[in-house]
Image (cartoon, helix red, strand yellow):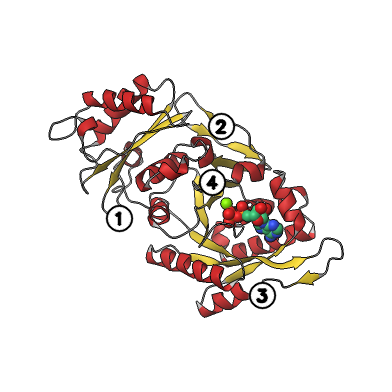
Amino acid sequence: MANPELAQRIKRALETVEIPGGGSLSGYAGLSDIIVTPSAVAFAIGVAPGMEAAFGPTRAAAERAAAAVAEGRKILVSLTSDKAGAKPATGEAKAQGRPGPGPKEPVPGIRHIIAVGSGKGGVGKSTVAVNLALALSAEGLKVGILDADLYGPSVPKLLGLEGKPAMREDGIFTPHSAFGLQAISIGSMLTPNQAVVWRGPMATAGLRQLLRESEWGDLDVLVIDMPPGTGDIQISLVQQVPLYGAVIVSTPQDLALIDAKKAVDMLLRTDVPVLGLIENMSYFVAPDTGTRYDIFGHGGARTASETYDLPFLGEVPLVMSIRETSDAGRPVVATDPEGPEAKAFRDIARTILDAHPALRRPSL
Ligand SMILES: Nc1ncnc2c1ncn2[C@@H]1O[C@H](COP(=O)(O)OP(=O)(O)O)[C@@H](O)[C@H]1O
Ligand SMILES: [Mg+2]
């Protein structure tokens, strides 16, 4: 449930916060909507490129002012610059002696980040993201999953996560732990139907907080379940994150493949390496007889990846048990790792690791 009354009170509290050059933050045109969820308050302050450092004290004061009236909610204030890819200066970057802040600043504790994207929803992106994370974990990697799909966060259901992630006293999230994965979902920050009010800057602010203000521990790979599509939100999300690369999930139908191609183009435009294409719901295996049917014209993604000169990572069959285990929060790679359904995901994980040995634990 939105809480317009609290949002109003926070906006009033921001009257006391000064912006560089004089004036109050609450009257500043660059202030975004104030989003109030049961556990968090989030807003963004848009600043001109180069002004991020000057706005640092404003951001800090805004956090304090909002915290004073937010009834214990976590406060997420971000500075957003209009320039594509620009990122506010953070104390963290300075403390670690990095040169300037940049969009590709690494996340402490995470060695590599892989995004799972798709041109459109419903192609099984989340199912693939979760099972791929589990398959990488089965190869001996320490793996986390970040559900960034604000349009339809489904990682909590897929992994059977309950409630919100715990928060340390200093406001850092402790991810859920499920089947050996560290997991956190943007869904815990949103009430139902709230995704629609999240604009680009809000979405990127939320993602940045979940990514950078969570205690991931020591991960070899973080898998991000991205929102489907190729719009502004998707572009700014990939620009926020220092990605090792992205995999694209598609079904074999022509239309899905056209959308997948758009996703590939978007990634290439944003300089994100495309690790390859996965064909999901590639063919149907009848639960009773085990007979295989190519109901969607299987093989489209393999052909498409040849056309676009991208690696083809593998096929995942359409199998009832994949759907059932997903719905039950017991993903197939975790619950039956040696079974035939898990094999598709495990083969894909091995294909990725063979092509990118840098993703493995250094000691392995
Ligand atoms: N290989 C598969 N076999 C059977 N059902 C699948 C498979 N992949 C996905 N599904 C089902 O399809 C639906 C959409 O999958 P989901 O992963 O939520 O897609 P997306 O994240 O792309 O919207 C879910 O009900 C899921 O269980
Ligand atoms: Mg999904």
Question: Who comes first in sequence, dot 3 or dot 4?
Answer: 4
Tell me which amino acid carries mark 1.
Ala
Q: Is residue 270 visible?
A: yes
Marks 2 and 3 sit apart, C-alpha to C-alpha, by 41 Å
The residue most toward the left is: 21
Q: Secondary structure at mark 4?
A: strand
Tell me which amino acid carries mark 3.
Gly
Q: Secondary structure at mark 1?
A: loop
Q: Does 128 appear above or below 67?
A: below
Q: Does 304 appear above or below 286?
A: below
Name the front one of labels 3 and 4: 3
Q: Of the numbered discs in the image, which one, if any, rests on residue 147?
A: 4
Q: Is residue 208 visible?
A: no
Question: Who comes first in sequence, dot 2 or dot 1?
Answer: 1
The percent coordinates of residue 11 (x first, y second) are: 29, 28
* Residue drawn 71% across the image and 53% down it: 323
Marks 1 and 4 sit apart, C-alpha to C-alpha, by 23 Å
Question: Who comes first in sequence, dot 4 or dot 2?
Answer: 4
**Mark 1 Cα-neighbour bin, 10 Å: few <14, some 14–19, many ≥20:** few
Question: Who comes first in sequence, dot 2 or dot 3?
Answer: 2
Q: Of the numbered discs in the image, which one, if any, rests on residue 164?
A: 2
* Residue drawn 43% across the image and 39% down it: 209
The residue most toward the right is: 289
Question: Who comes first in sequence, dot 3 or dot 1?
Answer: 1
The percent coordinates of residue 48 (x first, y second) are: 21, 46
Q: Nearer the viewer, residue 250 or 134?
A: 250
Q: Quadrant of the C terminus?
A: bottom right
Tell me which amino acid carries mark 2.
Lys
Specify the quadrant of the image occupied by residue 292. bottom right
The percent coordinates of residue 284 (x first, y second) are: 74, 66
Q: Of the numbered discs in the image, which one, if any, rests on residue 297?
A: 3
